[in-house]
């Protein structure tokens, strides 16, 4: 993607965020929608912050900061998923649950391997 296209998209996104902020303050929005929106904005903010604060030659630093933020975000999402299960908003009949369960198992296996290896 060329530089001009990125600049244009950033400007469009900035305008869209201003419009969303105006709409949010003028109406009632379900808390779950706001929390999802917050997580998406936080992820974008963290990515931009990591890129701005890093040495241009330190790509590993940026990747590590983003990976750490992903874990933090996943922890927040797991908290919400547990709540959704507890309130029956997410049930065994939810079509996404099977895929989520498989991804979760694979992730747990990798985390366990990481802890066992000590690195």
Image (tube, rainbow, N blue to C red):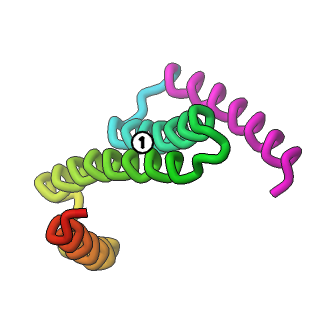
Q: Left or right of 19: which side holds 68?
A: left
Horizontal relation, residue 33 to residue 113: left or right: right
User: In percent of the image, x 17 and y 50: which residue is there?
Assistant: 83
Residue 26: x %, y % from top left: 52, 21
Q: Residue at x 58, y 37 (%)?
A: 54
Residue 3 at x, y percent in the picture: 84, 47
- Inspect the magenta stretch and tell me whether residue 97 lies in it: no
In which quadrant will I find the N terminus?
bottom right
Horizontally, residue 32 falls left or right of residue 118, namely right
At x 62%, y 34%, the residue is: 52
| Image quarter of residue 36 | top left
Task: Point out residue 75 in the picture as x, y percentages from the top left corner.
Answer: 26, 49
Let me know if residue 23 is in the magenta part: yes
Judge whether residue 97 can be spotted in this image.
no
Using residue 24 as the reference point, say whether residue 105 is left or right of it: left
Q: Report which residue position mark 1 lands on.
A: 39
Residue drawn at the location 23% of the way across and 55% of the way down: 81
**Is label 1 in a helix, a strand or a loop?**
helix
Residue 39 sits in which quadrant? Answer: top left
Mark 1 Cα within 10 Å, few/some/many (few <14, many 20+)?
A: some
Q: Up-down: is 107 above or below 27?
A: below
Query: Which residue is at the far left?
Result: 86
Magenta stretch: helix, strand or loop mostly: helix
Q: Quadrant of the C terminus?
A: bottom left
**Near-viewer residue (117 or 69):** 117
| Residue 5 visible in the picture | yes
Tell which of 71 and 24 is nearer to you: 71
User: What is the number of callouts on the image?
Assistant: 1
Instruction: Tell me which segment is drawn in magenta.
Output: 1-25
Q: Point out residue 99 in the picture as x, y percentages from the top left corner.
A: 32, 77
């Amino acid at each position: 993607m060329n530089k001009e296209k990125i600049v244009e998209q950033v400007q469009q996104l900035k305008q869209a965020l201003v419009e969303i902020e105006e709409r949010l303050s003028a109406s009632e929005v379900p808390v779950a929608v706001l929390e999802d929106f917050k997580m998406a904005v936080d992820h974008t903010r963290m990515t931009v912050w990591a890129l701005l604060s890093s040495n241009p030659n330190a790509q590993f630093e940026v990747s590590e900061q983003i990976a750490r933020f992903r874990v933090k975000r996943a922890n927040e999402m797991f908290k919400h998923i547990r709540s959704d299960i507890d309130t029956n908003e997410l049930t065994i009949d939810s079509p996404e649950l099977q895929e989520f369960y498989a991804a979760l198992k694979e992730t747990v296996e990798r985390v366990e391997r990481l802890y066992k290896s000590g690195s």
